[in-house]
Image (cartoon, helix red, strand yellow):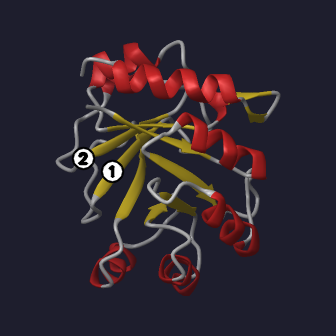
Amino acid sequence: MTKIKLCGLFRKIDIDYANEAQPDFVGFVFVKDSPRYITLKKALQFRQRLNANIPAVGVFRDAPFSEMVNLYQLGVIQYVQLHGHESEQVVNRLKQLRIPIIRAFSYTQSSFVTSADYVLIDGMKPGSGGIWPWEKITRPTQPFFLAGGLTPDNVTDAIQAVHPNVIDVSSGIETQHVKDLQKMIKIVRSVHNARN
């Protein structure tokens, strides 16, 4: 069964929405120039408010190694997602600490070589939310997250076309740039009911 991650939760009510929608993962963005950026203080509050059974993914771009490890060791996040120019040395250092890692790539790359536990395949610019031709991807050897331009209306088509392990959505569950409870519930149900 395909799983789903609802990413970019940045308001207290977003956590309540996630608890109601019951995704398999949520994502907290720790990239300062993102409109969905949250601080450590807010992330701690969110993790306490979030259903304990829903793991949180920390999204980073060229962040200090200590910041990623600290958030994991505090129990704020259960996965690290890398969206920058992090080297494989960084990936291996995180792996030595047994931190599960998701490494983001653009679908235009010809291969997804990494020792990360999971690969995330996105559009031309990872994190942009743009639609791209899902069927053109080269399937990685690791389990993979599919992201970019996904909405409650097209997610079933994406699953049938690509058979990802996890759907990753952020802007596709928003209305006027904030999370929309009905869209969150609808997409979670669509993913969980899809025949992969």
Expressed as whole percent of the image width and height from the top left, the position of residue 80 reads 45, 66
Q: Is residue 45 above or below residue 14?
A: below
The answer to whether marks 2 and 1 mark residues whose Cβ atoms lie closer than 8 Å is yes
Q: In which quarter of the image is residue 43?
A: bottom right
Name which residue type carries label 1: Val
Q: Quadrant of residue 87?
A: bottom left
Foreground of the two, 14 or 112: 14
Please give the label number shown on residue 143. 2
Foreground of the two, 186 or 146: 186
Residue at x-position 38% and y-position 20%: 158
Dot 1 corresponds to which residue?
119
Expressed as whole percent of the image width and height from the top left, the position of residue 24 reads 42, 44
| Label 1 Cα crowd, 10 Å radius (few <14 / some 14-19 / many 20+) | many
Label 2 sits on a secondary structure element that is: loop
Quadrant where the image shows the C terminus? top left
Expressed as whole percent of the image width and height from the top left, the position of residue 95 reads 29, 77
Residue at x-position 53% and y-position 77%: 68
Q: Distance between the residues labelled 2 and 1?
A: 7 Å
